[in-house]
Image (cartoon, rainbow, N blue to C red):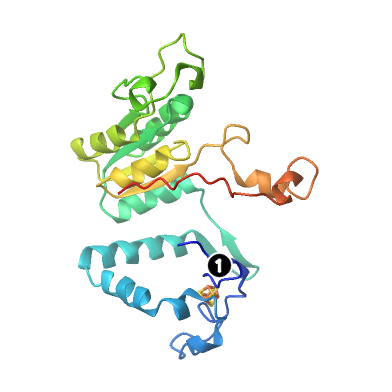
Amino acid sequence: MAKEKGEIRSSCARCPGTVCYPLAPAGAPMPPVEEAPAFCPMRRFPEAMDRASDAYENPGVREFARLASLQESQCYELDAAGIRTRIPRIEETMEFARKCGYTRIGIAFCVGLKEEARMIASIFENKGFEVVSVNCKVGRVPKEDIGLKGSEKIMGPDLMEPMCNPIAQAEVMEAEEVDLAVLLGLCVGHDTLFFRSCRVPCTVLAVKDRVLGHNPLAALYLSKSPYYGRLNAPGNNDTGVPKVRLD
Ligand code: SF4
C-alpha cells in the first residue's frame, strides 16, 4: 500500500533520545514512554519490544548479548580526563571472539581486498586463531548465469567474469564449521545476500567503499564542502521499479 506523505515513522535519528537512554542513576525508574515523541518506535511498536525481550530469554542469545555489551564497554576507558577509546575494530573483533570461546574465524572477503584479507588472516593466525578464508568469486559462476548481459559486466562482453557469490561464501562458512564469520569489503547487496544466507554468527570488519578507502563516512564528513555537497541535494525515488523480494 502506498505510504501517505507526512505519515509518522520511527525516527530515532531526529530524536534527542532522552527517554531510551536517560542520564539517570543506575536502578532509577525509566521515564514514562509517553514522554518520547510520537515517532518513537517504543511507542509505535510495544509488541516488537516485547518480542525482542523474549528473544533474550534464549540462554545462548542472552550470553552473546551480555558479552557483546561487555566488549563494548571494554572498548573505552574512563580516567580523570573523561572517556577514551581504547582499541580499533580489528582488535575488538578478536577480543570479542575470545570472550565467546571462538577459535576458528572465517573471513568472507571481496577479491578486490585480497591483500587486506591476507594481512588480516596473518594477524588472526599470529594471535592464535584458526583462519578460513573465502573470496567472493568462489563457485566461478559466470555473470550471464544470473541474467547479466555482456554489456553490463565490468569489463564488457568479451571477458569471462564470475559473479560475486555471497551465498556460496556463507555455505562454506558453515561447511568449514567456523565459529565466527567476518565480512570484509563485500559489495552492497552481496553483503545482504551473505547476511540472509549465513547460519553461523557473523560480524563485519569493513565495508567496501571503492573511492573512499573503504570508509563510507568520509563522504559525510565532506558533505558540507563542494566535494560531496551533492549528498544534500534533494532526490526523487519515484521510479516505478517494482520491489524485489527475497522471500
Ligand atoms: S527509541 Fe524513542 S526515545 Fe529513543 S531515540 Fe528513538 S525515538 Fe527517541
Q: Position of residue 14 (x, y in %)?
A: 62, 69
Q: Position of residue 119 (x, y in %)?
A: 44, 29
Instruction: Determine whether, in the image, residue 183 is placed left or right of residue 63.
Output: right
The residue beneath circle 1 is 4
When asked about the image quadrant of residue 172, the answer is: top left
Q: Classify 51 as above or below 111.
A: below
- Disc 1 crowd rating (10 Å Cα; few below 14, some 14-19, many 20+) is few
Residue type at the position of mark 1: Glu
Between 19 and 155, which is closer to the camera in this rendering? 155
Query: Residue placed at 34% from the left, 35% from the top?
Result: 166
Instruction: Determine whether, in the image, residue 138 is placed left or right of residue 191.
Output: left
Residue 184 in sight: yes
Q: Classify 52 as above or below 147.
A: below
Q: Position of residue 57 (x, y in %)?
A: 24, 72
Residue 131 in sight: no
> In what element is the residue under mark 1?
loop
